[in-house]
């Protein structure tokens, strides 16, 4: 064990295994935006290996300047678990050390309490009605993300007909934009399936994990394990980042912990939205003709089929699919990065949105709630509309 960060021998050995090759430098969105090599994984791994003392505010700041996007892990020849090491190092920092730590703690607390999140969404909708904000005000754009619920949430959403698929909605589709969950349910019906939405499910825990709140991430994992314990078959997840986090759920527990096995059992059942529907959706003869830019969420890029499946789906719609010229770019939202480092996040998003708009799309589609929020709050009204893939598929397949 060493210093306040309490790195164990295994992690210390991993850190010293960094080859300092620099392969992680050109792929790091933060490093690219800020022009500081020290902010890429190589610099952060070196800092972690060297730090044996009291973590300082500067140390916490450098640890915060990571999106946990995993681009570095995909090119690292030593296969270092950079995102895990970074998130665990964050967990060992004093609670309120680091940029926007209070906001991040508040965001995690709200996401962990569905009733509180619902109340805040309702309050935000009321505020939007009361305030006459200019169309391009940042607060107005954020409040515009909130959708009114058209029908009260049904406890358990029992199956209507056909085979039942368990559905993990994630916070965004359940509380903020229920049109995504509704579109997903209708797509399931097109496949001759119906959705079972266990009422007890909650936040996947990605925000807590990203903020170094590992105890909270484990508590949320237990809640979701329990919510799906009495069910069988695949668990459809309509947010790519929630899916990636649920697939990695066992890594929150040690292998001799009984919950590791339960986490593995849930992870084995997880099916990400585009992967699921690229197989389940019957062939369609649609010719919608919309110009669609598909934004690849960082968390999905690392999954097998993560880039191919959404494109297969879009091809069925008759959309004109616009590809990013210089490869997929991060949107700058991951790991609550937009809260911790708003200036860097804005720079990363500016490059990403310029790439997305270059081909003059009618729609920007994605399957990650975080990316969707970033686009919806960052796009001006007359530019393309940003939508979840479920909403686009519905529109295109009519
Ligand atoms: S996870 Fe992403 S932001 Fe963090 S160091 Fe790796 S490439 Fe950079
Ligand atoms: S790619 Fe991996 S091994 Fe190479 S410098 Fe980056 S973290 Fe170290």
Image: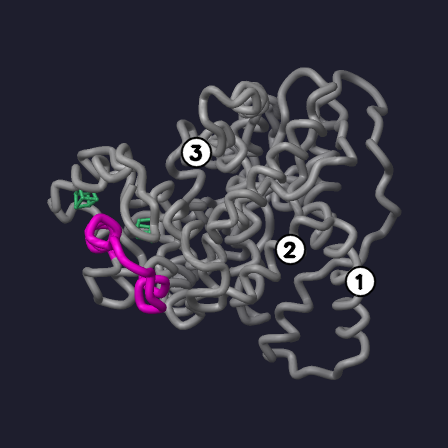
Q: Residues within 10 Å of mark 2 (few under 14, many from 20)?
A: some
- From the image, tell me which residue sits under label 3: 306
Percent of width and height locating residue 363: 54, 54
Q: Secondary structure at mark 2?
A: helix
Which circle marks residue 122 in the picture?
A: 1
Quadrant that contains the N terminus: top left
Q: Nearer the viewer, mark 2 or mark 1?
A: 2
Which circle marks residue 35 in the picture?
A: none
Colour pattern of the rendering = one colour
Quadrant that contains the C terminus: top right
Percent of width and height locating residue 69: 38, 48
- From the image, tell me which residue sits under label 2: 109
Label 1, ligand 1: CB separation under 8 Å? no
Magenta segment range?
A: 40-62
Label 2, ligand 1: CB separation under 8 Å? no
Precedes in sequence: disc 3 or disc 1: 1
Q: Residues within 10 Å of mark 3 (few under 14, many from 20)?
A: many
Image position of 4 with respect to 97: above or below = above
Dividing the image into four quarters, tell me where ligand 2 lies. top left
Precedes in sequence: disc 2 or disc 3: 2
Residue plotted at (88% across, 47% down): 152
Q: Secondary structure at mark 3?
A: loop
Image position of 17 with respect to 234: above or below = below
| Residue 289 visible to the viewer | yes
Image position of 299 with respect to 348: above or below = above
Q: Nearer the viewer, mark 3 or mark 1?
A: 1
């Amino acid at each position: 064990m060493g210093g306040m960060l309490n790195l164990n021998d295994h992690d210390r050995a991993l850190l010293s295994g960094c080859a300092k090759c620099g392969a992680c430098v050109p792929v790091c969105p933060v490093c690219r935006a800020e022009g500081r090599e020290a902010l890429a994984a190589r610099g952060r791994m070196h800092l972690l290996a060297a730090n044996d003392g009291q973590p300082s505010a500067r140390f916490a700041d450098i640890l915060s300047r990571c999106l946990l996007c995993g681009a570095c892990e995909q090119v690292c020849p030593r296969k270092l678990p950079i995102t895990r090491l970074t998130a665990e190092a964050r967990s060992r920092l004093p609670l309120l050390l680091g940029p926007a730590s209070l906001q991040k703690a508040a965001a995690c607390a709200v996401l962990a309490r569905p009733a509180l999140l619902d109340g805040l969404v309702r309050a935000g909708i009321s505020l939007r009605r009361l305030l006459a904000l200019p169309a391009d005000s940042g607060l107005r754009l954020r409040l515009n993300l909130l959708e009114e619920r058209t029908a009260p949430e049904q406890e358990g959403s029992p199956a209507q007909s056909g085979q039942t698929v368990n559905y993990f909605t994630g916070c965004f589709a359940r509380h903020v934009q229920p049109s995504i969950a509704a579109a997903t349910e209708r797509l399931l019906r097109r496949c001759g399936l119906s959705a079972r939405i266990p009422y007890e499910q909650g936040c996947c825990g990605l925000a807590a994990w990203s903020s170094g709140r590992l105890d909270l991430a484990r508590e949320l994992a237990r809640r979701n394990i329990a919510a799906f314990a009495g069910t069988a078959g695949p668990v459809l997840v309509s947010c790519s980042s929630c899916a990636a986090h649920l697939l990695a759920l066992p890594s929150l527990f040690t292998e001799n912990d009984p919950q590791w096995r339960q986490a593995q059992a849930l992870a084995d059942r997880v099916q990400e939205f585009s992967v699921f529907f690229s197989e389940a959706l019957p062939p369609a003869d649609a010719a919608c003709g919309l110009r669609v830019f598909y934004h690849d969420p960082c968390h999905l890029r690392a999954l097998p089929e993560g880039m191919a499946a959404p494109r297969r789906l879009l091809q069925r719609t008759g959309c004109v699919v616009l590809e990013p010229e210089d490869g997929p770019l991060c949107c700058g939202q991951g790991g609550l990065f937009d809260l911790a480092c708003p200036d860097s996040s804005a720079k990363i998003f500016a490059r990403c949105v310029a790439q997305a708009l270059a081909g003059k799309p009618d729609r920007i589609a994605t399957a990650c709630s975080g990316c969707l929020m970033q686009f919806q709050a960052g796009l001006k009204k007359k530019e393309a509309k940003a939508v979840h893939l479920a909403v686009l598929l519905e529109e295109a397949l009519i």
